Amino acid sequence: MSANIGPLVAVVSARYRTLLQYRAAAFAGFATQLFWGAIRLMILAAFFAAATEPQPMDLSQIVAYVWLGQALLGMLPWNVDADFRAQVRDGTVAYDLLRPLDLYSYWFGRTLAFRVAAPTLRGIPMVLFAMVLLPLAGLGDWALTPPASASAFAGFAASLVLAAMLATAVTLLAHISLLWTISGVGMDRILTVLVTVFSGLIVPLPLFPDWLQPFLNWQPFRGLADVPYRIYSGNIPPAEIAGELFFVLVWMIALVLLGRLILLRGVRRMVVQGG
Amino acid sequence: MPQIEVRGLAKTFRVAERLPGLAGAFRGLFHRRMRDVHALGGVDFDIERGELVGYIGPNGAGKSTTIKILAGILNPTAGTCRVDGLTPWRDRRRHVARIGVVFGQRTQLWWDLPVIESFDLLRDIYRIPAEAYRDNRDRLIALMDLEPLLDVPVRQLSLGQRMRSDLAAALLHGPSLLFLDEPTIGLDAVSKLAIRDFVRELNRERQVTVLLTTHDMDDIEALCERVMVIGNGRILVDGSVDGLRRRVRNERVLVVDYDSAGEAGTVDAGGDGVRLIERDASRVRIAFDPDRLPAATLIGRLLAQGTPKDLFIEHPPIEQTVAELYAEHDMRER
Amino acid sequence: MNSAALLYRYLSISLRGQLQYRASFLMAALGNLLNCVIELAGIWVLFDRFGNLSGWSFAEVAFFCGAVNATYAIGELMATGFDQFGTLYVKTGDFDRLLLRPRSTVLQLAGHELSLRRLGRLLPGLVIVIAAWAALDLPLEADRLALLAFAMAGGVAFFFALMVLQATMCFWTTESLELMNILTYGGVETASYPLPIYHRLFRRFFTFVVPLACIGYFPIVAVLGVDDPLGTSRMFQVAAPLAGFAFFGVAIGVWQLGVRRYTSTGS
């Protein structure tokens, strides 16, 4: 792995520089996510207002869930890297085979940079806004509360790292699939749907019907959002954190292995077709 | 009245400067420094109906800015321009209906459509009357030998085939003025010749006025009687191709071949600004200025020293002339 | 050839082109269909959990959701050229090509593509409206149908105008701007729920600044035949879709400004 760090640093730095050039896009992205967060909150709160029985999450946990979801939206593997797609389309992706690197590790680094760069730039202002500015504006009910406990914070940090790796592994599967379906326009649409529904972004997973819960609890996408956000708000109690982290880790490793396997066949295909 | 009348045309762009490095990129988020770039700094010229004018200059000198303004898709910062009595950027839609434009780097055709369907669509866009369209189309297809290409989608054409189709497409509505921007760029020799023949014919037979920008000086020599050179946003030279040569350096090269090996090694061309450029066993090349030393005198000197098998006079290649002109005005590519 | 006929020619060419790439069209249509279905499923999940939404039933909210999705799909279908304007025309410089032709740029861009994959959102949207209509036992009266059609026509003009505004922004910045997604995708999401659940500021914004509620909530309340908790009159509800057309007019004016800017910066 260590041989990959140098190029990785260069790739990450280049991506930050590119992102920073697009200042209008950065501000627009922030405003967009703010708007979505507000709409989601108003809808969920309106439903909550009618609730008579106790619910699997309370409103403040929902508020945290929504704001974290908006802050970390870019980290979810809901799309493919346009640069990568262009490279596949014009065949220059074959040049990556010329690099003296393990191809999967190299692409994992690239994809990780793609997944993580934007959310760090957007996530921090979003968290500051939701945690500091909202209470100052007298909208304390709608503010992001600090983590439920010290162990919740530690668990959240660890689950976030795992979520980033899991998101990268999923994105990379989509990238590798581009080697077969070059136009790939449809692929990422379906990926978007899968990811946004089953990570909990559209509706927090605990609010789904009870009979769906056993299925929702075992699918990998909840490691992307549902697990970290619920650890943060204390909806997943500290005693269960270790088990949840292990669950995400296992899925992450499984998807990495799957990706490697498919890439092996993809490379054979690239070599045969000459890109 | 000239067909194109350009007076004091100037164009200034404002561009944001990028600061280097990650820290610079961060600062650029909040504050951006702007810089003025003077693409055109007051340009004047006239073009008469039926002229075929070459327009040359290094990249970034203002060529394409001029063309865009003349075509009506860019407003100048200052100056006036009349084309057939219209101000291009003010009467854009009426103006563009009467001109043809071909960009060598970019196609005007529809990528996924067969050539003939692109033509039909252009007929509708330009509202070409059915009869005029049929005549024009059939003539252009015959002239450019497009018959075998008509049912091929544009994306499958070779560059040369595409350029022939693009030229035809730009002329379907019978414009009296044609702008050609690098029409021969990247073409093979045969396609280049075909394009040149066609443009010449169009100009001579149909009196279509042509403004041609190119980096290929063979295009200029083959087609243009008049050439304008632009540099740093100003017209530096406007005149005949010969005049351009004379303006920079009035020089010819006399090439002399000898039969017997070694004879060339002893030749002495003498003074009066004569330079020996090259000498090997059987050939010498001598540069001279005919105004200072007539060719006959030079040849007389050589005949006195031996018996050449053959001798002929070359113009220096125009590329060299132009390169020297650029150097003289300190024009770098921007 | 007049403009309508030329538009028809452009669009028939676009349709043939898309049929050449059938597989990717089907995939994209399926993705759009799933998006719409997912949105409805999300609403259903919340109703299943909470029972009702400040007095509105699931069928009523589904009606809002279906109508706005279908409306948006038609608007997007017709404005694809504007939707993709930044990447296809400004970044590549191909907008010059449109300017070199003696036709209006709006007409040429409207003719750019009739994107069939948007049908993936239109069909489920219409199915949802029909199913909700049946579930609510609404009488099948001509004036209700006419009002729904009028609301949708205003909505198509409204969403078309949003795409035009989004394209216009590309004259100022070629960065891929998500800002308009707030109003397009965000608009669809917002209009899928009844207006009264939102904060007062949002309600005003979507009524007076960006008249989304005028082509969604207000006329649909009249179609459903219920009283508006916000207390608007039937007259207002029926006339509201006109705001969509007015918004369209404003957008075209802004577009002309953008074109003027483009021709003076050339970028």
Image (tube, rainbow, N blue to C red):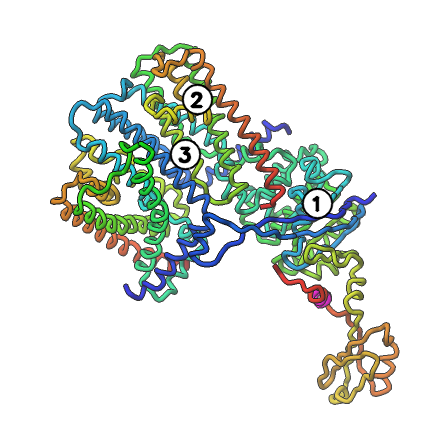
* In the rendered image, the vertical position of residue C50 relative to residue B326, given as above or below: above
Q: Which quarter of the image is occupied by the N terminus of chain B?
A: top right
Assign a secondary structure to mark 3: helix
Give the numbered dot on residue C182.
3
Q: What's the amino acid at mark 1?
A: Ala
| First-in-chain label (2 vs 3) | 3
Find disc 2 in the rendering and name its residue: C215
Residues rendered magenta in the picture:
B318-324
Where residue A12 sits: x, y (%)? 37, 56
Q: Residues within 10 Å of mark 2 (few under 14, many from 20)?
A: many
Please state which of residues B189 and C95 is positioned toward the viewer in this rendering: C95
Q: Which quarter of the image is occupied by the C terminus of chain B?
A: bottom right
Circle 1/circle 3 CB separation < 8 Å: no
User: Is residue B319 found inside the magenta-colored segment of the image?
Assistant: yes
Q: Is residue A45 visible?
A: yes
Q: Is residue A197 visible?
A: no
* In the rendered image, the vertical position of residue A157 relative to residue A11, given as above or below: above
Find disc 1 in the rendering and name its residue: B78
Q: Residues within 10 Å of mark 1 (few under 14, many from 20)?
A: some
Where residue C162 sits: x, y (%)? 48, 31
Please state which of residues B148 and C94 is positioned toward the viewer in this rendering: C94
